[in-house]
Image (spheres, helix red, strand yellow):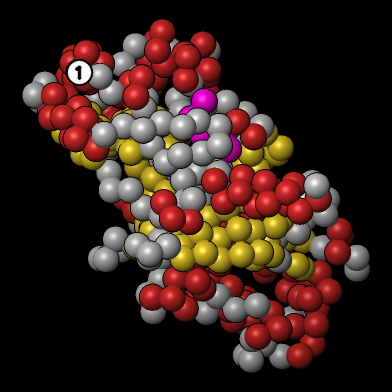
């Protein structure tokens, strides 16, 4: 069977696996062994020593991995960034990235849901690079599998938390992202509270989340306290304004009893004292269960935007917002020395490739 006709290993449901084994003359108990190989031992088919030779040959004939590891970079702060090339020849071949963040007591994998992004946020290298395609379930789940392998090799411990904050807008690919979450939740025993989906405020996807059976944590990339400023830096705000996004976030918090986090990137144009007061007023009126939690994110430089903000200004910004009764946190910067902000590794590799061809 040619590569392009093979199925992706991490696309199959339990029922699909049982059907495959039955159709190929293998006993049902082999399903547990395959499950252990893929989701507990994180083994490639060739590496496995439990399955019989004829089953391994059948698997290799019918299935392939979704991703090829191109580079693994490690930051001085222990952040790890993995650059993958997709291997599904039925789709366009793309580069995507996954980041592993070391917080001491936990290891968080930042997962991509699309190759590129159509949202066009002016401060994001991925958004400025354009949209190529949605990732498949196998490509999303395998990022988590590969991140586990790297995390175990580097740290001796597995991934504990998942955040969909890598390349792409997760809720523009909501159905596939949810199927991936269900697989990660069920197969890797990562609880809903340890899985976060971040959205720029893609309203159709936020509404779909109300029907999800796994109540993950929702993070909304707000980035501005008013529609005029937000539209300048987050173009999708023209379609889904702040009031609509806050209402959808409140509905999610009310249904699942989960506090929503609001992300806010620290740009020079959005972190003045006036905008801090305006944001404090906005979020203090948010009526979602648990109130609002603000995550202020120091900006990492890209070739698309240079932005220097004094850290003291960001601290003061948080202090002002907190005066309105809003829980505000300044996030620690991680992976700067390996360009670990969203899309930066792919951008750098692309630039290096371009330079080598000139």
Residue 71 image offset from top left, x and y in percent: 61, 65
Residue 20 is left or right of residue 13, and the answer is: right
**Residue placed at 51% from the left, 73% from the top?**
149
The relative height of residue 121 versus residue 78 in the rendered view (above or below) is above
Q: x%, y% of residue 123?
A: 48, 30
Residue indicated by mark 1: 273
- Residue at the spot 20% in from the left edge and 18% down from the top edge: 273
Does the segment drawn in magenta span residue 44?
no
In which quadrant is the N terminus drawn? bottom right
Whether residue 253 is visible here, answered yes or no, is yes
Q: Residue at x 42, y 62 (%)?
A: 75
Q: Position of residue 66 (x, y in %)?
A: 70, 60
Q: Quadrant of residue 222?
A: top left
* Picture layout, residue 102 above or below residue 34: above
Task: Return the residue found at the far front.
Answer: 358
Compare residues 327 and 171 and report the one nearer the observer: 327
Region rendered in magenta: 122-127
């Amino acid at each position: 069977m040619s590569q392009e006709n093979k199925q992706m290993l991490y696309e199959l449901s339990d029922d699909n696996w049982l059907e495959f084994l039955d159709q190929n003359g293998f006993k049902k108990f082999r399903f547990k062994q395959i499950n252990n190989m893929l989701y507990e031992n994180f083994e490639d088919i060739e590496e496995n020593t439990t399955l019989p030779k004829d089953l391994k040959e059948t698997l290799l004939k019918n299935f392939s991995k979704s991703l090829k590891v191109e580079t693994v970079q490690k930051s001085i702060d222990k952040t790890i960034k993995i650059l993958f090339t997709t291997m599904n020849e039925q789709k366009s071949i793309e580069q995507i990235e996954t980041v592993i963040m070391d917080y001491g007591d936990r290891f968080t994998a930042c997962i991509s849901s699309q190759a590129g992004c159509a949202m066009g946020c002016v401060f994001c290298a991925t958004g400025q690079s354009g949209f190529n395609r949605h990732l498949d379930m196998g490509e999303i789940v395998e990022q988590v599998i590969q991140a586990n392998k790297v995390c175990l090799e580097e740290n001796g411990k597995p991934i504990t938390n998942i955040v969909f904050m890598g390349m792409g807008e997760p809720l523009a690919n909501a159905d596939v992202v949810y199927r991936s979450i269900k697989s990660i939740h069920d197969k890797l025993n990562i609880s809903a509270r340890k899985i976060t989906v971040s959205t720029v405020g893609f309203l159709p996807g936020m509404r779909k989340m109300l029907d999800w059976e796994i109540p993950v944590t929702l993070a909304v990339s707000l980035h501005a306290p008013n529609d005029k400023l937000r539209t300048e830096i987050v173009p999708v705000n023209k379609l889904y304004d702040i009031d609509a996004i806050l209402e959808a976030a409140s509905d999610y918090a009310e249904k699942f009893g989960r506090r929503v986090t609001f992300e806010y990137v620290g740009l020079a144009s959005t972190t003045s004292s006036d905008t801090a007061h305006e944001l404090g007023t906005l979020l203090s009126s948010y009526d979602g269960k648990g109130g609002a939690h603000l995550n202020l994110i120091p900006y990492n430089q890209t070739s698309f935007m240079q932005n220097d903000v004094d850290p003291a200004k960001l601290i003061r910004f948080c202090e002002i917002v907190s005066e309105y009764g809003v829980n505000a946190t300044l996030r620690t910067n991680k992976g700067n020395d390996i360009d670990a902000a969203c899309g930066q590794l792919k951008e750098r590799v692309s630039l290096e490739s371009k330079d080598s061809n000139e």
